[in-house]
Amino acid sequence: MTSVSTPPRASAPDAAGPAPGRRRALWRNPWRHPWFLEGFTWLYLVWSLAPIVIAVLFSFNNGKSQATYQGLSFRWYWGDPVNSVWHNPQLQSAVFTTLKLSAYTTLIAVPIGVAFALGINRWRGRVPSSFNFVMILSFVVPELIFGVAMFFVFTRLFSGIQLGTLAEVLGLVTWNVSWPAILVQARLAGLGRQYEEAAADLGATQFQTMRRVLLPLLAPAIFASAILVFSGVIDDFVIVDLLSSNAGNTPMSVIIYSTQHGGNGGPALNALATIMLVFSFVVAAVGYAGYRFMTRGERIDGKQALATIAGAEG
């Protein structure tokens, strides 16, 4: 009986993958852990945040030195009867002036910006497109150029408006009105016209549609723009410095710069800067939490909320 010889089977490929010696080198793997980028990011964070941490730390220094730490104390916040923020009239006035300017600017700029957004969104043609371009152009114009222009407006063209709180508020409103206009326009573009058309089909008037349909839908964008305007005024320096008249209407940013630049800075100035920093963090936290709450039914994650509060369109 003749035996049939079977050809040898080809060896099956190794299911475990190529041998370790044949694997690509680690530096050629595009999916490897980005150690360099991660390290560079940490280096940037340390470089940018370390001076702030040191400044905040020395605001709690028990002594007057800004080079030698002499123990934890709240002396420069309220403990010192003369130089603390609580007892120094100039520093105390700077805190209230900053909050006042932020509140006035927000209360005036946000309604005007919302009205601009609604008008430009409803107005068709080349003219509203030009106005929309002007709104975006305000983000490109340097604040120094704008501040100098406003200074000449109030000192040459409209000399009846003296430099001071009124001039500062008018300048800040003009500079910050683009925030609500841009954010509300982005919200309107995402909503479309179907909600207003449905309300009109149900018999709602234009005023009822605006009050019961449009404004509730625009509330997240309006809230986010108010947070951006308020926080932007807190640390604004150029406009308020050019339009302020005396120490009675000088905000924290100008006091910090002028005092430190003049060589008269001390731990009390660090305390004032810390208060300014805390205000900014509190406003940002309130804005983030409020925006997440208002958009809780729209599946807005944390990154989208941060992008909107930071000023991104969407």
Image (cartoon, rainbow, N blue to C red):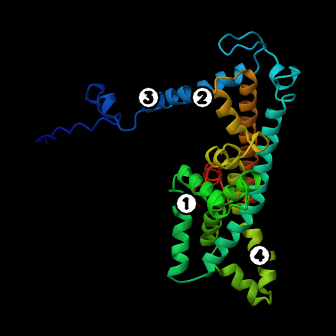
- In the image, which disc is placed on residue 215? none
Above or below: residue 202 compared with residue 244 = below
Pointer 4 residue:
213
Q: Nearer the viewer, mark 3 or mark 4?
A: 4
Mark 2: which amino acid? Leu
Mark 1: which amino acid? Ser
Pointer 2 residue:
49
Position in image of residue 67 (x %, y %): 65, 13
Specify the quadrant that holds the N terminus.
Answer: top left
Q: Residues within 10 Å of mark 1 (few under 14, many from 20)?
A: some
Front residue of this view, candidates 186 and 266: 266
Mark 4: which amino acid? Val
Q: Nearer the viewer, mark 1 or mark 4?
A: 1
Above or below: residue 155 compared with residue 191 = above
Can you see residue 179?
A: no
- Mark with earlier residue (1, 4): 1
- In the image, which disc is placed on residue 138? 1
Specify the quadrant that holds the C terminus.
Answer: bottom right
- Mark with earlier residue (2, 3): 3
Mark 2 and mark 3: Cα distance apart in space: 21 Å
Mark 1 and mark 3: Cα distance apart in space: 39 Å
Left-right relation of 80 to 257: right
Mark 3: which amino acid? Trp
Position in image of residue 294 (x %, y %): 76, 59
Position in image of residue 167 (x %, y %): 71, 55
